[in-house]
Image (cartoon, helix red, strand yellow):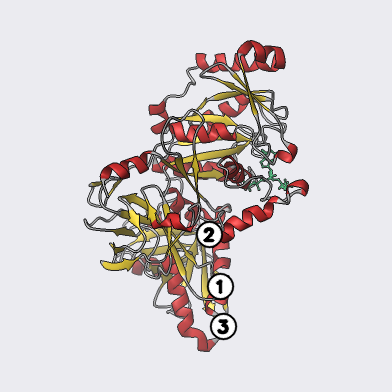
Amino acid sequence: MSSEVISREVKRRRTFAIISHPDAGKSTMTEALALHAHMISEAGAVHGKGSRRATVSDWMEMEKARGISVTSTALQFNYTPESSTAPLPNVINLVDTPGHSDFSEDTYRVLTAVDAAVMLIDAAKGLEPQTLKLFQVCRHRGIPVITVVNKWDRPGQTPLELIDEISERIGLIPTPLYVPVGIAGDYRGLLDRRTGEYIHFERTAGGAKIAPEILMNADEAAEREGDAWTEAQEEDQLLSELGQNHDQEMFLAGQTSPMIFTSAMLNFGVRQLLDALVEFAPPPHGRESIDGDEREVTDPFSAVVFKVQAGMDSSHRDRLAYMRIVSGEFERGMVVTHAQTGKPFATKYAQAVFGRDRSTVDNAYPGDVVGLVNAMALAPGDTLYMDSKVQFPPIPSFAPEHFSALRVTTADKYKQFRKAVDQMDAEGVVQVLRNDIRGDASPVMAAVGPMQFEVVTARMKAEFNVDTIVEPLGYSIARRTDEASAPELNRQRGVEVFTRSDGAILALFSDKWRLQYIEKEHSDLLLEPLVAAAD
Ligand code: G4P
């Protein structure tokens, strides 16, 4: 495959994730994007309200055709901005992030697979805890962020209040690309800050269709919208005086964030978001290997596994590994090498997880996400490559805050139990800790959120037919330690030392006071904090 073809494919691709607090409208926005990409003919499938209910089958048919839920993991669609003169459409990969904060570790892994993020905020609520946490991850990973203020059709804060909140609380300077015309709750259209023109949106019944746009010059806008237009113009001027105009370099450096006001429900501002993604979000780029060399996108095939999941097919036990392609071209059927084991991996059953139809998975390019079936040996963070060897740095695991012992309740299922524990461990569902005292019969699970434990017990039952019980342990903090410090730590009250499956030695403490006390009394012991989400 010529590198020109790969360069061309890379150039037209954009891979991003939406980060938001639950209820900010991520599902509605995903659907609105699919509508604008003409993947579905009507919106409303997510909520299936009254007149919009008919579209549910539309959405489900699409899911069925792909054999997997489009809302899980990734959605790929073609999109051509109106102003585009390119011969081919853009290819947009929207990688899904789990909604619940207990799965923030999964979200972190997903964010290693994207080149940009859309921070979706509810206009009335502003920055919420989950958004803040995920934003910190983006900052940590140097992922540029586009800010979307959603639900502008409902009463909320003023644009300037929201801008101030974002700059003050997270130090990111919003640079609105458009100023909304009409306050929150009275969304009429957008002032395009680059052209000074007015884009007026027309409502469609139930917000099911793409909202027609009427383009007007400033005089026409003033006549039609009166004070609402004047206010928008004043805000535009104020932002320009403050220097809050889009600057591509500062955006890519994570200092500024293009901002867009939307109503995902009415499909207002959604086209503008897609255009901004195409125009400003960076195309896929190379990645640094553990040796410090850059794997360029045009180099031979390489990919990173960022998510491993039990198969969707309940009739047989299967494991799907999702890889993000870093370089080269992926062709279904090619035999790649698993860098961690040096073993070959056949990709005959690569899944069309996001193509428009099944055939598109036959080829994929940097930025694309491909699901590999039967991926029993693959774990999040693993590298796959062809021809020239490469290994990318592992994805750091989070500092766990919840610890529970897991026990099998049916004695004759011990073998399956062990196998199941190893699988959950490899998939990264929980971290598994062991020590001699507890033995193998009762490994300790460490998690960022307790819901991860529920996933383990439910899957133990469903996939391995093993009944288990979870016994919460009285620990809340973990520190990395070493062999030399372990005996002394084990002698302390409220402390227990474990070995994690990756070989790390962890000491668990009942609470921070216990930890502080031991740090003070035994300053010679190694007690290193683990990587936290916001580090
Ligand atoms: P999430 O995936 O981020 O959790 O959010 P989701 O899209 O499910 O949206 C959460 C709620 O917010 C839904 O209302 C949805 O209809 C509403 N919503 C999303 N975008 C907009 C918007 O732009 N404007 C308005 N006004 N509402 C929006 P719900 O009451 O939970 O469901 P439903 O009764 O609407 O079906």
The first of marks 2 and 3 along the sequence is 2
Image location (x, y in percent) of residue 17: 49, 45
Distance (Cα) linking label 1 and label 2: 16 Å
- Which of labels 2 and 3 is toward the front? 2
Image location (x, y in percent) of residue 496: 43, 68
Q: Give the residue at mark 3.
A: 409
Comparing 153 with 168, the one in front is: 153
Please indicate, yes or no, whether residue 43 appears anywhere in the rendered image.
yes
Badge 1 element = loop
Q: Is residue 298 left or right of residue 178?
A: left
Q: Is residue 97 above or below residue 12?
A: below
The amino acid on which the numbered mark 1 sits, given as a three-letter code, is: Ser
Comparing 497 with 336, the one in front is: 336
The amino acid on which the numbered mark 3 sits, given as a three-letter code, is: Thr
The amino acid on which the numbered mark 2 sits, given as a three-letter code, is: Arg
Q: Quick check: is the Cβ at mark 1 less than 8 Å away from ligand 1?
A: no
In contact (CB < 8 Å): disc 1 and disc 2 = no
The mark found on residue 66 in the picture is 2
